[in-house]
Image (spheres, rainbow, N blue to C red):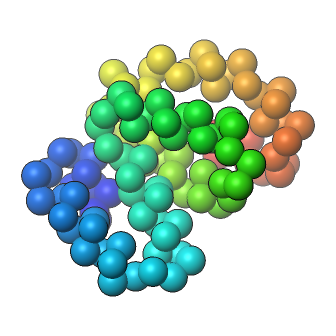
Amino acid sequence: MIAALIEHADPDAPATLDAEETRDTSGDGRKYAYATKAARPEPVTKGQYFKDYLKSAALQEDWIEQSLQMFNYWNQSAFTLTYLEKALNSLPQIKRDRKIFFVLAW
């Protein structure tokens, strides 16, 4: 629900996410907060997430998989279309370095 608010640039969404992050510090809470932040309709956010997807060895695959839907939210193609060719070109790397089912989420 918070991701939808962020995806639509609701002005109260950042404070709601901050409150939820403070409330839920579990592993799943951190994962879902990471995924939710990928929904921010900002070029800088999309760029940082895409870089993390390809370069961060510490970032767990399930965190990436969880965030991909938010990253590619339907109304944000103006921010994400630029990554389509880069994503397709990175498929050999993804196929080599990630688990077999990861490509389906990619």
Q: Where is residue 100 in the image (x, y as percent from the top left)?
A: 84, 48
Q: In which quarter of the image is the N terminus?
A: bottom left
Residue shown at 84%/36% (left/top)?
Answer: 95
Number of numbered discs visible in the structure rendering: 0
Residue shown at 47%/17% (left/top)?
Answer: 82
Q: Position of residue 11 (x, y in %)?
A: 10, 52
Q: In which quarter of the image is the C terminus?
A: top right
Left or right? Give the position of 19 relative to 33.
left
Left or right? Give the position of 13 relative to 100.
left
Left or right? Give the position of 26 relative to 103.
left
User: In the rendered image of this protein, does residue 43 appear above or below residue 6?
Assistant: above
* Residue projecting furthest to the right: 96
Q: Is residue 43 visible?
A: yes
Residue shown at 45%/41% (left/top)?
Answer: 71
Q: Where is residue 2 in the image (x, y as percent from the top left)?
A: 28, 63
Q: Can residue 104 be seen in this view?
A: no
Q: Position of residue 35 (x, y in %)?
A: 47, 56
* Residue projecting furthest to the left: 11
Residue shown at 60%/41% (left/top)?
Answer: 52
In this view of the protein, which residue sits in the foreground, 20 or 5?
20
